[in-house]
Amino acid sequence: MIEDKNQGRTSLSELGEFGLITHLTKAFKIKQPSTVKGIGDDAAVMSFKNKQVVLTTDMLIEQVHFDLSYMPLKHLGYKAVMVNLSDVYAMNAEATQITVSVAVSNRFSLEALEALYSGIETAARIYGVDVVGGDTTSSVSGLVISITAVGEVDADRVVYRSGAKPNDLLVVSGDLGGAYMGLQVLEREKAVFKVNPQSQPDLDAYTYIIERQLKPEARKDVVTLLRDLDVKPTSMIDISDGLSSEVIHLCKQSDVGVELYENKIPLDPQVIATCEEFDIDSTTVALNGGEDYELLLTVDQNDYPKIKGNPNLTVIGFVKDKSQGMHLITRGEQAIPLIAKGWNALKED
Amino acid sequence: MIEDKNQGRTSLSELGEFGLITHLTKAFKIKQPSTVKGIGDDAAVMSFKNKQVVLTTDMLIEQVHFDLSYMPLKHLGYKAVMVNLSDVYAMNAEATQITVSVAVSNRFSLEALEALYSGIETAARIYGVDVVGGDTTSSVSGLVISITAVGEVDADRVVYRSGAKPNDLLVVSGDLGGAYMGLQVLEREKAVFKVNPQSQPDLDAYTYIIERQLKPEARKDVVTLLRDLDVKPTSMIDISDGLSSEVIHLCKQSDVGVELYENKIPLDPQVIATCEEFDIDSTTVALNGGEDYELLLTVDQNDYPKIKGNPNLTVIGFVKDKSQGMHLITRGEQAIPLIAKGWNALKED
């Protein structure tokens, strides 16, 4: 689990800035028909014809968004791409291009950067996006990754956060809380490793939730599924900060209320078992644990037959009139006001 | 010159992440017809119809790309936008949107971030670009700014680095070396200030070169001028790393050689005077000093009458066959091979 930092080391300065970029990006292939010119000029050039273009950007900072003591660099590269693609899919768009900027200190070897870019390349290849630009520069301290993602969508297919209306179904893809509980397990193992570096962790019982934390997948498949089912959500958002926070975003921007049913929230058995082991309430984890990168959407009731029984989609509540507020309906049928306790990147450190 | 860090301080954590972004971006206005949806959803949405889209990104890191001891935050915000727009203009495109990601440690107050965003807003307003996305997050150490710029251009107007051909004129906008010499003056004053904090620097003799360093302007006007003159360059690049490095880029990507005339390189009198004062060769400064953000272009000889005598454009050489190599022709008519010594962000620190 702990990365071996003593592999072959090549100093970054041996290659120089341009040599380094050329070396790291040589595996990137251009496949999107919209890419006219990729890496190698002052800017990339793209042609989207009559499609609308979506654009999103996210920056990941060492010790704030990730911890290299249990996050392998290849996984980090993969995850950094997923975080951005997830925002593109949340617009109901197809992701087409990304740019990647990386700042590293000289404590990173060329081999370490190669691992990072290998994860980026793998993600780009699997999800069919072209890497069309970016830069690699030095940092005086930690690793910084900034990715910008571009997507395309027909104007009549784009889905905003603001279109939910009373009586719509509240729907979520996949299951929730896994990434957060995976993080708890990894943090525990890190603490054990500090005390006893000879310990051999047995992580078999946590493979799913650790993968949810270290190698999340953006739900491209859900965008495809919705198109195949002929369902256009009335609103959509990706779940990066926890279900509660995202439900509140949708409601506020759509000017509606909501009833969310505790007993409908999809949880993997591994999440439930690990919550019991850690003595944490699984509903709290689903509501406030971040980084699941599932999609939260609202769907017109007339579309219910199209999504009913689909294993990728779970109806977890109903959109209400704004005057009815935003509530969690507990297993005991109590209505508790929803509050956003999601992860806050600007809390005091 | 040295920023007063003891102004009113509001802790960043008082606002929280979403409150902070809303607060910092409230002055941003949407004006570009291509912007469909700006800040506030998972991604921005744009519509470019039959135009091609250019995309470029740059990351600026404290202590690597800037020093806050003499760079006021408002200027830094402005410059960060310029660095990116310059790449858009180098494609002969019109800049239309930017996204802005900022990472700060808690040593920054709200007022400091407001100054940074004020510079970004000023640049966006003056250059007519919409700020359509981005994020603000925490950093464990220094300030990181990552900006992505989007532009639009008719497919038949886009200019790459690769189109130069033998006998084309090598042309540069503005004058060179100013930003580098401005940095030398600022570094000297910083050293003096460390020894004697009471010293009052007299910078009147350096106003132009200090402004070139602290508040550069991207050459949007040159793109407009070229269109008005009905000149489409055969190749173009922006000068961020020094003339020598950029000439070599153009030649390599166009598969040509070049003769660059030392006595034609445009230098401001303040650059010449300051070079004499610092006992530095002004040609070396123009060739290797970075951050001028001028445009370097090649123009067909048939277009010479259109650009002749224009005060914004200087012919500094000729494109040659690749076999003739890349040379600087000195005042003494010696031919010296061009080498790239430009600023290297990955040198050993």
Image (spheres, coloured by chain):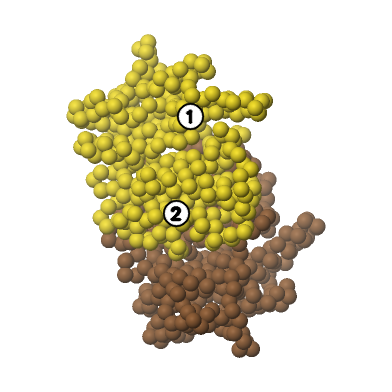
Chain colours: A brown, B yellow
For numbered disc 2, what is the local secondary structure?
loop
Residue A247 at x, y = what percent? 52, 74
Crowding around mark 2 (Cα neighbors within 10 Å: few <14, some 14 to 19, many 20+) is few
Pointers 1 and 2 within a single chain: yes
Q: Nearer the viewer, residue B347 or A215?
A: B347
Q: Nearer the viewer, residue B60 or A144?
A: B60
Q: Residue furthest top?
A: B332
Q: Residue furthest right?
A: A195
Residue B204 at x, y = what percent? 49, 24
* Amino acid at pointer 1: Ile
Chain under callout 2:
B
For numbered disc 1, what is the local secondary structure?
helix
Residue at numbered disc 2: B27
- Residue A128 position (above or below residue B241): below
Crowding around mark 1 (Cα neighbors within 10 Å: few <14, some 14 to 19, many 20+) is many
> Label 1 vs label 2: CA separation?
28 Å
Image mark count: 2
Residue at numbered disc 1: B210
Q: Residue furthest bottom?
A: A333
* Amino acid at pointer 2: Ala
Disc nearer the start of the sequence (1/2): 2
Q: Nearer the viewer, residue A59 or A224?
A: A59
- Residue A172 position (above or below residue B267): below
Chain under callout 1:
B
Residue B281 lies left or right of residue A140; in this view the side is: left
Residue B322, by quadrant, is top left
Seen at 29% across and 31% down, the residue is: B298
Work out which quarter of the rendered image holds the C terminus of chain A and state it. bottom right
